[in-house]
Image: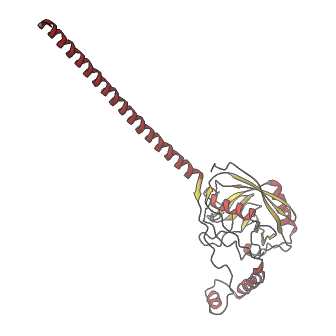
Amino acid sequence: MSTNQERRAEARQRLREQMEAQARREKQLKIAAASTVAILLLGLVGVVVWNKQQEARAEQHAADWLTCEYPEAPNETPEKIAGAQAKELIDSGQADQKQIDDYNKDVDEALAAKDKEKIVAAPEGEQPRRGTAEAVLSLDSGDVPITLDRSQAPCNVSSMVNLIESGYLDNNTCHRLAVAKGDEGLSVLQCGDPTGTGAFGPGYTVVDEPPTDLPVSQDGSGMSVYPRGTVAIANTGQPNSGGGQFFLVYKDSTLPPNYAVVGSIAEEGLTVIEALAKNVPDNSDKQPQDQKPRRPIAIKKATVLSQEGLPES
């Protein structure tokens, strides 16, 4: 039979065991709680890091890509000036009868050539903001290598690449060869209308991306200088009206800064264009918009040779 002393000893032992068990449970609970907190903190940190990575990726994507608008072009078929419209222009001094007659002659030529018009699909999806494209315009008088730079006008460069790759510029007659009078004026070869009249485009237009870094003309006109060797997109003077036509500047030319600069011409290409300007009979007595090549100038084939520096998709 257990004595009172033994019973008290057993009770104390059970109490110690219970207290030790309680201490172990509390320790385990603390460890579990700490682990849970650590996991939650790690998860929270992971979410924050993931969000930061997503934001960085979104920022990088926005820096690399953009969505360009290429609206369907309005009806480009020109109409003659006659009747009350002609009288109003003459009475207001905006035009004389000879200018109207010349314009109507151009309209007749454009309508006669309309069957040569080409319609191509505009670029789709997002377009890269950076990267260059090396291309060559093979004229009947020699090759004109050009470098297209997306960083200057990404939507217009994407359109230009699209026009070349679609074959739009193949067998394309250059309809304008402007020769400046003296050191100031316009010295460009303009191409890009398959009809060879300057009246038509590819069926879509391109958003304006005007240059911001052109030098200002020193003639006090407030116009900008498009340097020799510039490739720029022509437009009608209306907002967002660029399309298939472009001009190659073979001598510094003064213009409003309203024409997207898409690239540059290699020196060997400038030599080809300068030879054309010298050999074509003089037309410098005409206004720049009326200076048409007196001998045909044509792009036989346009080719994109390579593209570099494009962002990863």
Which is more toward the observer, 290 or 237?
A: 237
User: Does residue 57 sit above or below 242 in this rendering?
Assistant: above
Residue at 32% in and 25% down: 28
Q: Can residue 185 be seen at all in this image of the molecule?
A: no
Looking at this rendering, what residue extends furthest in the front direction?
1
Residue at 56% in and 48% down: 60
Q: Can residue 11 be seen at all in this image of the molecule?
A: yes
Which is more toward the observer, 179 or 262?
A: 262
Q: How many marks?
A: 0
Q: Quadrant of residue 248?
A: bottom right
User: Does residue 134 sit above or below 240 in this rendering?
Assistant: above
| Place of residue 224 in the rendered image (x, y in percent of width and height, measured from the top left) | 65, 61
Indicate the quadrant containing the N terminus: top left, top right, bottom left or bottom right.
top left
Q: Is residue 281 left or right of residue 249?
A: right
| Place of residue 163 in the rendered image (x, y in percent of width and height, measured from the top left) | 72, 65
Q: Quadrant of residue 39?
A: top left
Q: Is residue 215 left or right of residue 164?
A: left
- Asked which colour scheme the image uses, the reply is secondary structure
| Place of residue 159 in the rendered image (x, y in percent of width and height, measured from the top left) | 67, 63
Looking at this rendering, what residue extends furthest in the bottom direction?
83
Residue at 26% in and 17% down: 20
| Place of residue 136 in the rendered image (x, y in percent of width and height, measured from the top left) | 80, 58
